[in-house]
Structures are given as C-alpha cells and as structure tokens.
C-alpha cells in the first residue's frame, strides 16, 4: 500500500503543470533574430542579431516546444493560434509567445507555419540542441518564464501535452506568473 501511495504521488507530480520539472530546464541558448520585421518588433529584438530569452521585451514569455511531425502539435495548432490571440488581448501585462521546432529544420518549421497559419515567431531546432537543454521533453511542451537579466530569467510554469481548456490554461499561466 505504501508503494501505491508513492506511485500515485509521483504520477500527480509528473503531470501537474506546477511541478513539471522546471528545475531541469536550461534556457542557456540563443535564437536567431526573426527575418520578419513584425516578429522583430513583437519580441523587441534587433534585426540580424541573435538574442537570448532575457532580451525579449515582455513581462511573460511563453515558449511552445513543438514538432511538425507530432500529431498532437498538428491537432493543437489552431488552439495555439487562439492562445496567441488571447495573449495579445491581455492589457495589464505584455505576454509574448514563440515556438521552437524540436528536430525541425528551417524548411520544416516554415512548412508548419504556412500549413497552420501560425502568426507568432517560430524557430528551428534542427539538431535538437535546445530540446536537449530543456530535458528532451515530449511535444507539445509549454514553458512560461519571466525574462530578466540572464541570471534572473525565471521559469514559473510548464505544461506538457495538449491544452484541454484554453481559458483554464491562460488562467493557470497568469496565476503562476504572480
């Protein structure tokens, strides 16, 4: 019975967004500046210069780790587009959303963007460098963080898998950010 109790606690901790292993995440990486001016302005980054997450001009940055080959990511793409629209409407905080294509080349990432009408910036992680740094989480995987100076960027939220209820997801994200 004791082992069953321990197993139940381990399962709850492993699936709970608040405990989804943010201590395993390494956000020590740089992304290339987006080519589109609208995305450069959206993130507040300089054109043509790689940037680290702490450079994003936002109170909250949400990262979706996706793969164009992930059937859940494909199915969820319209919902994530709606998430982007919801985040854009938040008035008291600037919230930004980016996607990182785990194992996806620049071509595959662009194909995913065009196929699903993605409006927010997507970045390629063709060699799984970023994916390995965040602990090789399954896709889709969401990370909420507060950009700050590199030593103070704070992960406050993680969510693995599909978004069952979009409003509840946004509420959890914003409450966790407080």
Image (spheres, rainbow, N blue to C red):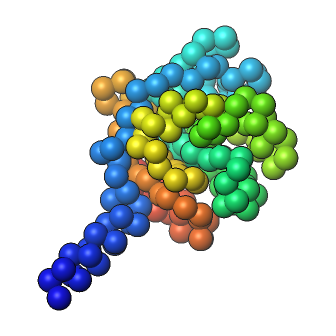
Q: Is residue 65 visible?
A: yes
Q: Position of residue 98 (x, y in %)?
A: 61, 39
In this view, 29 is above or below 86: above
In this view, 108 is above or below 86: above
Residue shown at 37% from the left, 57% from the top: 20
Task: Count up the numbered dots.
Answer: 0
Q: In the visual, does 135 lie left or right of 141?
A: left
Most foreground residue, 9 or 94:
9
Residue 125: name its quadrant: top right
Q: Position of residue 39 (x, y in %)?
A: 71, 28
Q: Position of residue 60 (x, y in %)?
A: 49, 41
Residue at the far left in the pictured view: 2
Residue shown at 71% from the left, 47% from the top: 68
Q: Position of residue 57 (x, y in %)?
A: 53, 28
Q: In the visual, does 132 lie left or right of 94?
A: left
Q: Is residue 93 visible?
A: no
In this view, 65 is above or below 6: above
Most foreground residue, 127 or 173:
127
Residue at the far bottom in the pictured view: 1
Most foreground residue, 54 or 14:
14
Residue shown at 40% from the left, 27% from the top: 28
Q: In the visual, does 7 lie left or right of 102?
A: left
Residue shown at 59% from the left, 71% from the top: 164
In this view, 174 is above or below 26: below
What quarter of the picture does the N terminus occupy? bottom left
């Amino acid at each position: 019975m004791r082992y069953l109790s321990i197993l139940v606690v381990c399962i709850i901790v492993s699936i709970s967004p608040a405990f989804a292993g943010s201590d395993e995440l390494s956000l020590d990486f740089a992304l290339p500046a987006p080519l589109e001016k609208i995305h450069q302005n959206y993130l507040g980054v300089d054109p043509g210069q790689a940037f680290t997450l702490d450079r994003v001009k936002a109170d909250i940055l949400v990262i979706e780790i996706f793969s164009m080959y992930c059937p859940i990511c494909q199915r969820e793409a319209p919902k994530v587009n709606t998430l982007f629209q919801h985040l854009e409407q938040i008035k008291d905080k600037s919230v930004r959303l980016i996607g990182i294509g785990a194992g996806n080349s620049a071509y595959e990432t662009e194909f995913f963007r065009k196929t699903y009408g993605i409006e927010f910036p997507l970045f390629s992680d063709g060699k799984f460098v970023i994916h390995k740094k965040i602990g090789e989480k399954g896709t889709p995987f969401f990370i909420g963080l507060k950009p700050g100076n590199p030593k103070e960027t704070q992960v406050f939220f993680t969510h693995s898998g599909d978004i069952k209820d979009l409003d509840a997801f946004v509420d959890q994200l914003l409450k966790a950010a407080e």
